[in-house]
């Protein structure tokens, strides 16, 4: 059952998004997340399981929503993920950031980048360009416009999800909320 009173996603999935699956798939799942949020780390493998279960029927998009007041290293981590994306390694960095969420100092972020491996001169240049910070800010703005206040916040088929973030409730919500 879809709750019609919940906010809708103001910015639909588009080419700029980090997606697993194909935009326009039967089901869509957008997560606004924070790399230091323990709840986001908890749901990361659940999302991966949903992606495996639904395969080409699901488009999952991750958007940044760092909460610096409670997670001071979340924004630098998100910027590092964006810099890794410039070298085609967003999802590798994304997964490593969640596994390392208690070790996100500048030096540790660079260590994760070296281990991927990324070209470190390019990585540093991209970070200093400000483009990753602007991209993170765009995600935060789109989340705020959609009613996001905490992480993780999911939008299931374009509508904010108010239920459990466990596998079966999310799977049920995706299937029930799909367009006919």
Image: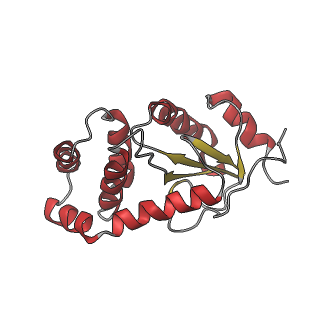
- Viewer-closest of 84 and 22: 84
The N terminus, quarter of image: top right
Give the image location of residue 24, x and y in percent.
Answer: 66, 62
Residue 175 quadrant: top right
- Viewer-closest of 38 and 25: 38
Give the image location of residue 74, x and y in percent.
Answer: 37, 45
Left/right placement of residue 16 relative to residue 7 reads left
Give the image location of residue 65, x and y in percent.
Answer: 49, 50
Left/right placement of residue 171 relative to residue 60 reads right
Which residue corresponds to the image point at 42% horizontal and 38% vertical from the top-left?
70
Which residue corresponds to the image point at 34% horizontal and 69% vertical from the top-left?
131
- Viewer-closest of 42 and 50: 42
Q: How many marks on residues?
A: 0
Farthest-out residue, front: 69
Res 157 visible: no
Which colour style is shown? secondary structure
Residue 51 quadrant: top right
Left/right placement of residue 5 relative to residue 13 reads right
- Viewer-closest of 74 and 119: 74
Query: Is 145 located above or below residue 99 in the figure?
Result: below
Give the image location of residue 162, x and y in percent.
Answer: 71, 37
Res 34 visible: yes
Query: Is 17 located above or below residue 21 in the figure?
Result: below
Query: Is 11 located above or below residue 40 in the figure?
Result: below
Which residue corresponds to the image point at 85% horizontal and 53% vertical from the top-left?
180
Which residue corresponds to the image point at 48% horizontal and 29% vertical from the top-left?
42
């Amino acid at each position: 059952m879809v709750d019609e009173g919940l906010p809708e996603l103001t910015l639909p999935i588009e080419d700029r998004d980090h997606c697993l699956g194909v935009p326009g798939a039967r089901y869509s799942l957008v997560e606004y997340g924070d790399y230091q949020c323990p709840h986001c780390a908890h749901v990361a493998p659940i999302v991966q399981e949903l992606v495996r279960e639904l395969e080409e029927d699901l488009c999952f998009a991750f958007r940044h929503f760092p909460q610096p007041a409670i997670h001071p290293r979340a924004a630098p981590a998100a910027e590092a993920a964006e810099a890794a994306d410039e070298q085609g390694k967003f999802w590798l960095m994304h997964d490593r950031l969640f596994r390392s969420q208690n070790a996100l100092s500048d030096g540790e972020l660079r260590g994760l980048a070296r281990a991927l491996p990324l070209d470190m001169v390019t990585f540093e240049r991209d970070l200093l360009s400000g483009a990753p910070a602007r991209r993170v800010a765009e995600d935060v703005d789109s989340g705020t416009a959609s009613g996001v206040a905490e992480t993780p916040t999911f939008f299931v088929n374009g509508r904010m999800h108010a239920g459990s973030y466990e596998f079966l409730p999310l799977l049920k919500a995706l299937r029930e909320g799909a367009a006919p």
